[in-house]
Image (cartoon, rainbow, N blue to C red):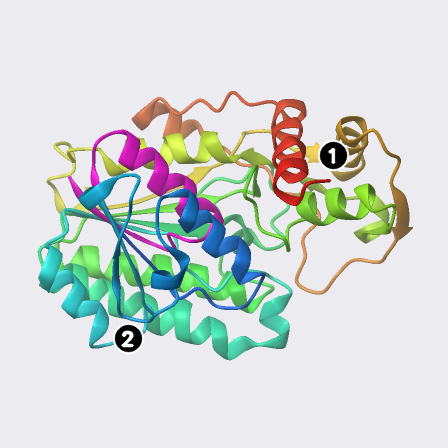
Amino acid sequence: MKILITGAAGFIGYHLTEKLLKKGHQVVGIDSINDYYDTGLKFARLENLGIDPSCAEIFGKTCSGNTYGEDFRFQRLLLEDREGLPALFKEHGFDVVCNMAAQAGVRYSLENPMAYVDSNLIGFVNLLECCRHYGVKHLVYASSSSVYGQNEKIPFETSDRVDHPISLYAATKKSNELMAHTYSHLYGLPTTGLRFFTVYGPWGRPDMALFLFTDAILKEKPIKVFNNGDLERDFTYIDDIVEGVVRIAEDDLADRASAEDRYKLYNIGNGKSVNLMDFISEIEKHTGKKALKEMMPMQPGDVNRTWASTSALQRDYDYRPNTSISDGIAAFVAWYREYYQT
């Protein structure tokens, strides 16, 4: 298939791009490469896919890789570009679109809300319009576990009410689900939304807990432990996430011919919750250093616990994550040490 991956220089988008290319698909990747976190890491991911960073720096320039040849092309592009995005769709005629692009981060949405409006709202509508007008067969898009807010029912089910978001980031992700539903209903566009649960692993984002903690522990600096450590997360290893996304992207949708089946929504997580203090202990074990903990109160927009029910994804796609927290953290620490030469 010919697949568009938005956010291809991002953490999940990079791994998804690599997986689909290795499976023989043609992939076009786009990314704004904004400076929310170190752009050097984003360019390094692209370079690992064979893209020359000096080419990737230029907005609108098509870059071909030297690793996968013409099977992978990259263009620096904003989702909200109302001329550039339709032109890309017209040129390539995509079968499937995997939207992994978004302005990420719960806490940053308190500081720079307009970045979320531009990318996550205007950009997503622009993407839906392109999918509608250029014959895309399936849109797979990233939602987030943050839509559950302070939901106390455990584990989280996609049937739970999620109309009380506690961050703008969460509100934009819920909005994406509603927009996708509308386009599935009105225009027959098959859409599949995936509520990701705390994805971690090699090449991960520097604003995420695993990266922040590993970096500080290895440098013997204190780590900030919010809510005094009384937090739990459904941590999901990147390879498990990507395996689920690929299975959905490759689905021929034969069983989704009826109108009510064109819109789907799934949790994609590890299916269990891990205490934050146990998570830190695993990092200590694999770094060989003790953490200097600075206990902090709860952060605005944060939640106490996440835990995904993945039974629907197991039923429909035989999705079964199998990476333990210990193995996943070990892989990240090994990558971090190699990448930063520590």
Q: Position of residue 226 (x, y in %)?
A: 80, 53
Judging depth in this view, the residue of 13 and 259 nearest the camera is 13
Does residue 21 show up magenta in the picture? yes
Spatial distance from mark 2 to mark 1, Cα to Cα?
Answer: 40 Å
- Res. 161 in view: no
Q: Position of residue 315 (x, y in %)?
A: 34, 24
Left or right position of 220 against 342: right
Question: What label sits on residue 152 in the rendered view?
Answer: none
Q: Nearer the viewer, residue 322 or 83?
A: 83
Q: Residues within 10 Å of mark 2 (few under 14, many from 20)?
A: some
- On the rendered structure, is 88 left or right of 122? left
Counting from the top left corner in percent of width and height, residue 182 is at 24, 61
Q: Earlier in the sequence, mark 2 or mark 1?
A: 2
Instruction: Quarter of the image for the N terminus: give it.
Output: top left
Report which residue position mark 1 lands on. Answer: 279
- The three-letter amino acid code for the residue at tag 2 is Asp
Residue 271 in sight: yes
Give how far across and how far down residue 183 sits, in percent: 20, 60
Q: Is residue 293 above or below residue 90?
A: above
Secondary structure beneath dot 2 equals: loop
**Tag of residue 81:** 2
Q: Quadrant of residue 135?
A: bottom left
In this rendered view, identify the residue nearer to me: 57 or 323. 57
Q: Quadrant of residue 282?
A: top right
Q: Considering the numbered disc 1 on the image, is that residue within a helix, a strand or a loop?
A: helix
x 66%, y 63%: residue: 301
Q: Amino acid at mark 1?
A: Phe
Choose top left, top right, bottom left or bottom right for residue 278: top right
Give neighbour class at mark 1: few <14, some 14-19, many 20+ (Cα, 10 Å).
some
Question: Which segment did they paint magenta?
Answer: 1-26
In the image, residue 247 above or below residue 9: above
